[in-house]
Image (cartoon, grey):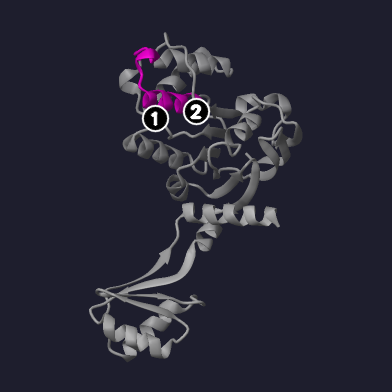
Amino acid sequence: MDVKVDHLTKSNRVKDVSFQLQSGKITALIGANGAGKTTLLHMLAGILSPSKGTIQFDVKKEDIRSLIGFMPQYPAFHQWMSAKEYLVYAGRLSGLSAKQAERDAEDGLIRVGLDPVIKQRIEAFSGGMKQRLGIAQALIGNPPILLLDEPVSALDPKGRSDVMDLLNELKGKQTILYSTHVLHDAEKLCDDVIMLHHGRMIKRSSLNDLLQLAETGEFIVETSAATDLAKKLKIVEPTWEIQQGNGSVKLHAPDYKDVSLSLLKHMYAAEISFTKIAQVSQTLDDVFRKVVEHESLSRSL
């Protein structure tokens, strides 16, 4: 299900944000604390009303609530309930029959790895267990749209990996928007990225396009003939910056589109063997910092 956001504004927390979520895709909402991620998600979930702008779904307005699964950053629960009781309660509130709510509750607890504590009171849960329960609650009724606010923030590495696997399993089946400041997770999972900074959207792009921005003109060649290769490259490629290391040569090429092919030709001509040629890439974190720096510079001019 597609979601279209036009010029969405809320006080000074979200400022004139427009984008579209495409059906079946996972979009990562990236930004530092205070960037406006939670406010934006709350408006999409119908918890907050925008000061300006519109949110359009592919359904009638009265149907929207039942089609959204929302997990807040800090889920709140009735502590005296068991995990299953809470999920059945959430399912009934969302309009499910008693039988369907019970079935969804049991399935949800299995999916998030809480089935061993199905009857345990929530008051005894750890922070990570409550985070898992919050995700299970968002999945009740199999809503076509999932809005998740920092879904892995309180989880240990195993829990984070489990949730990432679950979201990957849902990819293509549900439209998912989740906020995160763990860019490594976004890089592994999402199709698209929305970057927020001080309430403004500073970048909206597919992950593939962003990763192309992450490419650099730096390459590393691992070879036992590092000295010979460095000397050769300084002669045949005078525009390249060459640094010789211990068993390797690092180079920076201004125009790096055909560097690998050129390297192979030069090494073949000089009869130099190698074990590895690798292009040095930036992380999504590096790209985010560069986009923020560019936005700050543009606004100061």
Query: Is residue 93 rendered magenta in the image?
Result: no
Magenta region: 119-138
Circles 2 and 1: CB atoms closer than 8 Å? yes
Apparent side of residue 34 relative to residue 125 in the rendered image (left or right): right
Q: Earlier in the sequence, mark 2 or mark 1?
A: 1
Amino acid type shown at disc 1: Arg
Quarter of the rendering containing residue 210 = bottom right
Most frequent secondary structure within the magenta stretch: helix
Among the 4 quarters of the image, the one containing residue 244: bottom left
Q: Which quadrant is the C terminus positioned in?
A: bottom right
Q: At numbered mark 2, what does the secondary structure look like: helix, strand or loop?
A: helix
Write the residue at 28% across / 86% down. 228
Residue sitting farthest toward the front: 300
Q: Residue at x 61, y 24 (%)?
A: 66
Q: Amino acid at mark 2?
A: Leu
Residue 41 in the image, given as x and y percentages of width and height: 60, 33
Residue bearing mark 1 = 111
The answer to which image quadrant residue 131 occupies is top left
Is residue 174 visible in the rendered image? The answer is no
Q: Secondary structure at mark 1?
A: helix
Please state, as top left, top right, bottom left or bottom right, where the N terminus lies in the image. Answer: top right
**Residue 121 on the magenta segment:** yes
Q: Nearer the viewer, residue 120 or 43?
A: 43
The residue at the point 39 percent across, 29 percent down is 112
Q: Residues within 10 Å of mark 2 (few under 14, many from 20)?
A: many
Residue on which disc 2 sits: 139
